[in-house]
Image (cartoon, rainbow, N blue to C red):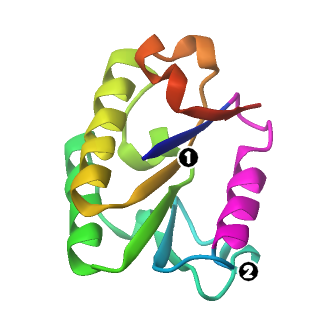
Amino acid sequence: MIQLITGAKGKGKTRYLLEKANESIKTADGHIVYIDKNQKHMYDLSNRIRLIDASRFPLKSGDEFIGFILGIAAQDHDLQEIYLDSFLTLAKINEDSEQVKDYILQLENIGKICDVSFIISISMDQDQLDPVLYDRITVSL
């Protein structure tokens, strides 16, 4: 399953994502991973949530990012949710709606195969996204 949190930079997507992750750990049956572009929010997350600082890995493209996600999913069979903060930065992609759609649909397929939910913050307004993704938007700020 894919849940998108959309909106321009500075609208509160990260704060919402952090709160959602911390709330979900209270009832989670499996592991939760939060992937961020740095370690800035380390102390904002429950210590039961695994924070991964993506800047520590030499990811250069969206395809490498997908491989990175597959590696995380493959090594943890109890993985339940992956939170992706600043999706465009993490995935090394621009605001091209077609490219964004393609990578989000790839993540959706990974989620189905591995039984993992993805909760993604993306610095784009709803009208900038491909209409195919509209039903995956849970919050638009």
Q: Name the dominant secondary structure of the magenta segment.
A: helix
Residue 63 located within the stretch drawn in magenta: no
For this rendering, which residue is in front, 58 or 108?
Answer: 108
For badge 2, the amino acid type reads Tyr
For badge 1, the amino acid type reads Ser
Place residue 58 in its image quadrant.
Answer: bottom left
For this rendering, which residue is in front, 47 or 89?
Answer: 47
For this rendering, which residue is in front, 30 or 16?
Answer: 30
Whether 38 is drawn above or below 99: the answer is below
Dot 1 corresponds to which residue?
Answer: 86
Cα separation between marks 2 and 1: 18 Å
Q: Earlier in the sequence, mark 2 or mark 1?
A: 2
Count of marks placed on residues:
2
Q: Residues within 10 Å of mark 1 (few under 14, many from 20)?
A: some
Residue at x 50% of width, y 17% of height: 129
Would residue 93 appear left or right of 139 to someone viewing this image?
left
For this rendering, which residue is in front, 78 or 64?
Answer: 78
Q: Residues within 10 Å of mark 2 (few under 14, many from 20)?
A: few
Residue 93 pos. (x, y %): 37, 34
Residue 15 located within the stretch drawn in magenta: yes
Would residue 80 appear left or right of 64 to someone viewing this image?
right
Residue 132 pos. (x, y %): 41, 17
Residue 60 pos. (x, y %): 26, 48
Residue numbers of the magenta segment: 7-24
Q: Quadrant of the C terminus?
A: top right
Residue at x 69% of width, y 76% of height: 45
Dot 2 corresponds to which residue?
Answer: 43
Label 2 sits on a secondary structure element that is helix
Residue 74 pos. (x, y %): 20, 72
